[in-house]
Structures are given as C-alpha cells and as structure tokens.
C-alpha cells in the first residue's frame, strides 16, 4: 500500500506509514493526475497508443535527512565497570595466594615451618612464670 503523503510503499496490513507516519487506510491511494476533458478533435483514448512507464519505488537512503520520522537518540557510551575488575583482581589474588601457600606447606621447608610453629606455641603455653 502506498502512502498518500510521501509515496512510500508499506505492507498491506500497516496502518501507518513507516516513512512519514501518516495514517494509511484501505481506500486511500495516490490521487490521479488531472486529465483534461476530451475535445471533439482528439481521437478516443483507445486509438492512441500510450507509453506506460513503470513507477519506481522511492529509493531509501539512510543518510538522507528526510528518511527517518525522527532522529534516533544518541547511544550512551558503555559504562566502565572498574569496581568489577577490582573485585575480580582481588579474588584472583586470594586464590593464587591460597594455592601458592598450600603448595609451599606440602614441601619439606613448609613442613619444617609448621613443626617449628607448633613447637614454639606449645613452649609458650606450657611455660610458667
């Protein structure tokens, strides 16, 4: 269905023009050109061959300022979620520190450190003043 205002071709079930927003009704169409009344000296229209030119649809250029009904709002730049990166970094640091300390405690020097800490804490608790 063609829009009576701008000539844009819309779908048959559309109620408004997608180009200009004009109301589309089933009975509306583009008005025909004025045909002057026939004179007596002109032959009837069936005797004169007429060249028919196909109507080309209006080209839709997205860069044309009249192409859209209204300008689109500018998109806001995406927010940087720095707090999320900081929190992720802290969690990653804690996981790596835990893994490293666990690996260290399973080695010989780590076992010696644990034994020394246990011995010192037992001596401090059992020492009487």
Image (spheres, helix red, strand yellow):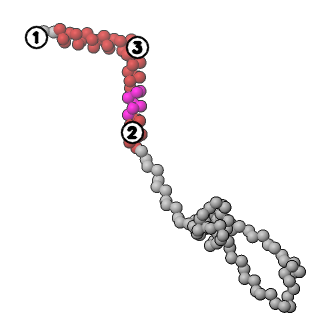
Residue lying at 53% horizontally and 64% vertically, measured from the top left: 71
Q: Residue furthest right?
A: 47
State how far apart marks 2 and 3 are (Cα).
Answer: 32 Å
User: Which stretch did the figure color magenta?
Assistant: 90-96
Image location of residue 55, percent across then percent down: 75, 70
Q: Nearer the viewer, residue 55 or 43?
A: 43
Quarter of the image where the N terminus is located: bottom right
Residue at 20 percent of width and 9 percent of height: 123
Whether residue 123 sits left or right of residue 54 in the image: it is left
Chief secondary structure of the magenta span? helix
Indicate whether residue 68 is drawn in magenta: no
Say which of 22 and 115 sits in front: 22
Q: Quadrant of residue 30?
A: bottom right
Q: Nearer the viewer, mark 2 or mark 3?
A: 2
Q: Position of residue 109 (x, y in %)?
A: 37, 13
* Label 1: how many Cα within 10 Å (few below 14, some 14–19, many 20+): few
The local crowd at label 2, few if under 14, some if 14 to 19, many if 20 or more residues have their Cα within 10 Å, is few
Residue hosting label 1: 129
User: Relative to 96, is 61 on the left or the right?
Assistant: right
Going from N to C along the chain, the mark reached first, 1 or 3, is: 3
Left or right: residue 76 compared with residue 43: left
């Amino acid at each position: 269905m063609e829009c009576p205002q701008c000539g844009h071709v819309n779908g048959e079930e559309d109620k408004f023009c997608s180009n200009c927003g004009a109301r589309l009704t089933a009975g509306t169409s583009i008005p025909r050109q004025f045909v002057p009344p026939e004179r007596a000296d002109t032959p009837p229209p069936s005797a004169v061959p007429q060249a028919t030119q196909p109507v080309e649809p209006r080209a839709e250029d997205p860069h044309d300022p009249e192409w859209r009904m209204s300008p689109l709002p500018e998109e806001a730049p995406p927010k940087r979620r720095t707090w999320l990166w900081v929190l992720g970094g802290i969690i990653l640091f804690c996981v790596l520190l835990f893994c490293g300390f666990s690996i260290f405690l399973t080695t010989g020097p780590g076992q010696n450190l644990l034994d020394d800490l246990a011995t010192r804490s037992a001596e401090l608790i059992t020492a009487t003043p």
